[in-house]
Image (cartoon, rainbow, N blue to C red):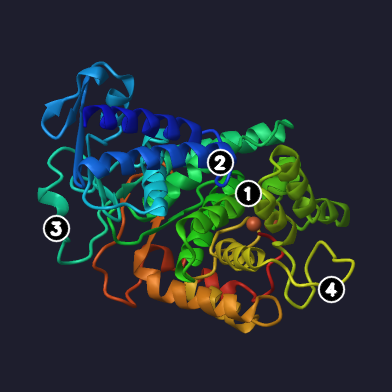
Amino acid sequence: MTEAATRFLVSFAQALSTMALYPDGHPAREGVVDTAYGNLAALQRLSRQVSLSFLGDEVLLGDRPIRELRGWDWSGRLSAAGVQRLQFESEVARDEFEGFLSEVLARLTLSAIQQAPGASQGGVGPIRFGAVGIRELDEEPEIETATIALTLKEESDTIDWLHEEMFHGAELPLAEAEAVVRSLALAMHGDRAMVVPLLKLRRYDEYTTTHSLNVCVLAMALAEWVGLGARDVRAFGVSGLLHDVGKTRIPPEILNKAGRLTQPERELMNHHPVEGARIIIQSEENLDLAAVVAYEHHIMVNGGGYPLLGYPRECHHASKMVHVCDVYDALRTNRPYRAAWPARKVLDYIGERSGTEFDTEVARSFVKMMQEWEPRVAALEAGEAVVAPSGTPPGAPAPAAEAPGPGAASRTPPSPPSEG
Ligand SMILES: [Fe+2]
Ligand SMILES: [Fe+2]
């Protein structure tokens, strides 16, 4: 039994380190997940219920220390990330196991999520993990609460750094981008209840970072809303995060210009989808969905927008979804040339342009999702810990749903956005 547990834990650690390096679907990643999953199945053939604890230097199987793993460095690493106990309660499915690995990896990779007491438990299917004392916290809370405190500072800093790297012509640091997506996915499900954490813009030059993170969160929320699985949700998240990566090659004085763009500046700006797709493809050939989305996210269903397609064709579903999320976040944000629109006005706008700019089905899903999840929207400033709203009655205004300033909306002409 201890031998099987050791074999499982060593392959579990191997899977975590490999997953940090390779994207979803990569053969190297699939291979290590399969191995760890196989070793877990072998362990569970000996005992269906398995409980492992990581207490500093010591690893316990049930209440007995595993001698072979004394001083194992992963024990300290896991317990420092809040994974002090791991329980497998019954048979685990392969995708549940992979989902669980992703959650643990997110905890290990980014320490951005400062969890409120009682919110440090995680779980996927029959797997439970978290701090010691997990059993008392196992019962479902009666009222759905979202008590996770978020800062998103590290995610925001990571994306700032990523954009800086891209500005200097570096290759796309994919592992960091994926770690941010995993961390955001985890933040959205921190305490069982769904939270949609959206960042507020503080300075205009932070727009691309704030906007990328918000579109990532919205794309994942929408993907989840329409019923996609965890892996697809993350792929949509990566696509949302990178949709404007082409803007990192645009000089900041044009990107953040307060006045109207001149014709040559506009042309340069409108080149960002093509540039983004090129950056992504050159950096990582497996990121084809993100490259397609970067290319297509400004194309309207009636063929308008940019880049101009040589022949009319339908865009990828992911592009249509990111397009709606993109416009929503752009209009909800204060820009140098116009104030942010209130949430309701943006949703009306999306509804009005459904069938011309936006795909009808996608627009309907998005509007419905935002109406229903409005109480779950947490408006944050990067670095400022905000406890996500909980128990808000449906229809009550959430922080992000408020108008940006007195009279701001009424002064705004309802012109179609050219940014995003
Ligand atoms: Fe955008
Ligand atoms: Fe864009």
Residue that carries the numbered disc 2 in the rendered image:
177
**Secondary structure category for the residue under label 3:** loop
**Left or right of 28: which side holds 66?**
left
Q: Nearer the viewer, residue 418 or 220?
A: 220
Residue 240 lies, in percent from the top left, at: 59, 55
**Left or right of 385: which side holds 163?**
right
Image mark for residue 312: 4
Image mark for residue 242: 1
Mark 4 residue type: Pro
> Of callouts 1 and 2, which one flags the residue occurring earlier in the amino acid sequence?
2
**Secondary structure category for the residue under label 2:** helix
> Of callouts 4 and 1, which one flags the residue occurring earlier in the amino acid sequence?
1
Image mark for residue 139: 3
Mark 3 residue type: Glu
Nearest to the eye among marks 3 and 2: give it: 3
Q: Quadrant of residue 329?
A: bottom right
Disc 4 + disc 2, Cβ < 8 Å: no
**Secondary structure category for the residue under label 4:** loop
Question: CB of residue at label 2: within 8 Å of ligand 1?
Answer: no
Disc 1 + disc 2, Cβ < 8 Å: yes
Q: Measuring 42% from the left and 63% from the top, which residue is drawn there?
A: 400
**Left or right of 143: which side holds 258?**
right
Question: CB of residue at label 1: within 8 Å of ligand 1?
Answer: no
